[in-house]
Image (cartoon, coloured by chain):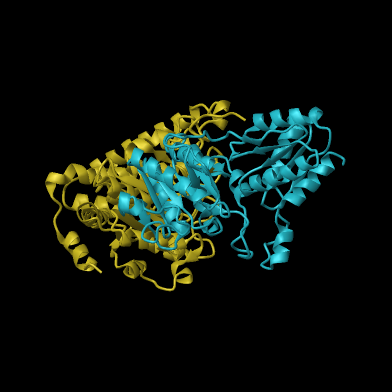
């Protein structure tokens, strides 16, 4: 362990640096954008404009925003299928993400990926992967490539706590530690793998301890506080970039919505009281109150920010709704590098 | 032209491609210090060092995924499975990650990786170590599947596979590593998707690949002694399948037998037969027959194993049947 509790309290007690106010406000805006985007996506799903599976990120916004803010533009990012928030935080436009959810040609994967397979190679955003845990070795391979080419790039992998019981997680972390790869594994511990609570699936409660099996640096991070998340990520990035050492961050967070759109908010596996209790630490409220308390924003500014975010989301919705479907010829395109039609 | 074993032809292809392109690296179990479980990678660690010849833990799912990830960002990994039997642990990475990445990223991300290792029926290794998997992978859009039968093809096809921008499943014949043959030196590159007539003939086409090419050639010799002129068509690539070559041969001979080491149900031969009946139905003078491994897990006992495997006698019998002899 790396003294995470002490590090966390230092971050909490330190006054925010006014010189970084723009960045801090930017984080709030990104979190608000994700929240309003996901609310709109849920609405569009109910209207039948989004099909298939749709996993919302509401409640976990500070994790993607705080961690991605610590990366370089050329770093590599892979995510699970709950990745709308990461895509937005990495700078993919709300229009391109919403259009992808709508299956439209203007989507960031041309309408062929959908909610679970968002990509933007120009931003190092390398998916949206739909098989639990299977993308963890992919990120390890990207970290291997960075080391192979000596580029000082970092490969970051986001996954849920349910993925740590999967062989791919252990195989990937073992190799990353064995070969000293610049990889950062971010376990977003939202307490439930679909409807199975952590303690019903994992023999140990502290997922960070799993890193000890591989002598890997690890921290438990408060994922509802964007500043704490960012600070932990900066330490991990430093470790990866300067020391070629991987890190496992266990980020404690909570999803305020169901597992997917077909899952009610609490269902049979958690109580309404628990959800209400967790909602008291809404990451957006935590951060906006902090910024107001330290007089980096006032209430009017927060409200204005929310209004501008809602306009951006509404614009994305209208754009996606009116955008054309992929043309029929797209069906057989990009199966192979050389197009073949069969 | 130098004579090399199939194993050394593969080694030569790897060495030449690693010399040519610094993005090519080899990763797998025992590929480095041990010099390869089947000695395909002999000498490569000394020449290229441990960053390019990477020994892995026994973790097929893990290192196959590492290969896919490295390929997604532009390296050209050659991932060695000690055998394709063990690669079933990694099939998710081949099917769900490698094969689909280009499509689901809308063409943004390719996976220029080669997954290679031995497969096919072996000698008394029992049910879990003696299997042919090419039909599994050939089923999947996004993968290419290559099964060389000779040392020259092994070299030329591996070089093509490494240069290919898509994931290639490269299944070597486990029983072929010691087979010798002439192998062109240097730049010998065989395009994927081209079948090869290994023996020209006029009366019947025997379609085969990998180890069954040698079996079919022996069958053709026996048939020749009996006055039957058989053509042996080696598919070399299962996907893309060289439909033109299959149809050209059957259009000439009007009769066909398809041989493979794998199981009969939904096998490679089923696809070949489908192609012929759809596109050359009127050319056929007899139903097409298939000769396959028996529809059982491979038994250990020598006599039972012999009964389960494709052999020249079974091919000859099938040829006689399609000739109504």
Quadrant in the rendering for residue B32: bottom left
* Location of residue B317 with respect to A97 vertically, above or below: below
Chain A visual colour: yellow
Quadrant in the rendering for residue A126: top left
Asked if residue B224 lies left or right of residue B7, the reply is: right
Asked if residue B103 lies left or right of residue B256, the reply is: left
Residue in the foreground of this view, choosing between A203 and A313: A203
Q: Determine the residue positioned at 43% across, 57% down.
A: B36
Residue in the foreground of this view, choosing between B113 and A277: B113
Name the quadrant of the N terminus of chain A. bottom left
Most extreme residue toward the right is: B324
Locate residue B46, reporting x and y percent. Answer: 31, 53
Is residue A306 visible from the viewing direction of this image?
yes
Asked if residue A317 lies left or right of residue B280, the reply is: left
Which chain: cyan?
Answer: B
Locate residue B221, reporting x and y percent. Answer: 72, 43
Locate residue A338, reporting x and y percent. Answer: 50, 30
């Amino acid at each position: 362990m790396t003294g995470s509790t002490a590090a966390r309290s230092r971050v909490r007690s330190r006054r925010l640096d006014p010189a970084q106010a723009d960045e801090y406000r930017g984080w709030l805006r990104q979190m608000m954008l994700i929240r309003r985007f996901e609310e709109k996506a849920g609405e569009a799903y109910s209207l039948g404009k989004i099909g298939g599976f749709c996993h919302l990120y509401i409640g976990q916004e500070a994790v993607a925003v705080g961690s991605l803010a610590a990366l370089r533009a050329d770093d590599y990012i892979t995510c699970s299928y709950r990745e709308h928030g990461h895509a937005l935080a990495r700078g993919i436009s709300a229009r391109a993400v919403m259009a992808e959810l709508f299956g439209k040609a203007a989507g960031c994967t041309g309408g062929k990926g959908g909610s679970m397979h968002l990509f933007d190679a120009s931003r190092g955003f390398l998916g949206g992967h739909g098989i639990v845990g299977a993308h963890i070795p992919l990120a390890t391979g990207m970290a291997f490539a960075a080391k192979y080419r000596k580029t000082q790039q970092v490969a970051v992998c986001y996954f849920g706590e349910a993925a740590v019981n999967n062989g791919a997680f252990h195989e990937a972390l073992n190799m990353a530690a064995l070969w000293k790869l610049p990889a950062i594994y971010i376990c977003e511990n939202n307490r439930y793998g679909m409807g199975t609570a952590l303690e019903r699936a994992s023999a140990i409660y502290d997922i960070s301890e799993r890193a000890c099996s591989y002598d890997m640096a690890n921290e438990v991070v408060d994922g509802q506080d964007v500043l704490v998340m960012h600070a932990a990520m900066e330490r991990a990035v430093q470790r990866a970039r300067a020391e070629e050492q991987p890190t496992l961050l266990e980020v404690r967070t909570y999803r305020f919505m169901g597992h997917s759109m077909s899952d009610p908010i609490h269902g049979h596996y958690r109580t309404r009281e628990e959800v209400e209790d967790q909602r008291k630490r809404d990451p957006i409220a935590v951060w906006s109150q902090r910024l107001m308390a330290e007089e980096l924003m006032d209430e009017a500014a927060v409200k204005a920010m929310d209004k501008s975010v809602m306009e951006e989301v509404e614009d994305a919705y209208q754009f996606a709704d009116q955008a054309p479907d992929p043309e029929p010829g797209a069906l057989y395109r990009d199966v192979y590098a050389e197009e073949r039609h069969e | 032209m130098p004579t090399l074993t199939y194993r050394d032809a593969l080694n030569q292809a790897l060495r030449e491609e690693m010399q040519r392109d610094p993005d090519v690296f080899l990763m797998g179990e025992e590929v480095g210090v041990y010099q390869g479980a089947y000695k395909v990678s002999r000498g490569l660690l000394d020449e290229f060092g441990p960053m390019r010849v990477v020994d892995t833990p026994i973790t097929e799912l893990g290192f196959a995924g590492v290969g896919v990830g490295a390929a997604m960002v532009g390296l050209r990994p050659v991932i060695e499975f000690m055998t394709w039997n063990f690669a079933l642990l990694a099939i998710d990475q081949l099917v769900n990650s490698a094969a689909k990445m280009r499509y689901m990223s809308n063409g943004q991300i390719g996976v220029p990786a080669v997954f290679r290792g031995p497969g096919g029926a072996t000698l008394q290794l029992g049910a879990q170590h003696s299997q042919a998997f090419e039909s599994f992978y050939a089923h999947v859009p996004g993968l290419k599947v290559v099964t060389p039968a000779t040392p020259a093809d092994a070299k030329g096809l591996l070089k093509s596979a490494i240069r290919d921008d898509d994931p290639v499943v490269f299944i070597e014949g486990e029983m072929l590593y010691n087979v010798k043959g002439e192998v062109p030196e240097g730049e010998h590159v065989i395009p994927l998707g081209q079948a090869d007539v290994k023996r020209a003939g006029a009366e019947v086409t025997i379609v085969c690949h990998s180890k069954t090419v040698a079996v079919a050639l022996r069958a053709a010799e026996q048939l020749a002694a009996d006055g039957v002129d058989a053509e042996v068509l080696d598919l070399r690539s299962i996907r893309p399948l060289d439909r033109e070559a299959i149809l050209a041969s059957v259009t000439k001979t009007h009769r066909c037998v398809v041989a493979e080491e794998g199981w009969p149900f939904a096998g490679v031969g089923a696809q070949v037969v489908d192609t012929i009946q759809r596109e050359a139905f009127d050319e056929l003078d007899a139903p097409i027959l298939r000769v396959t491994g028996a529809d059982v897990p491979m038994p250990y006992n020598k006599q039972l194993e012999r009964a389960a495997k494709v052999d020249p006698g079974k091919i000859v019998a099938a040829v006689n049947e399609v000739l109504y002899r």
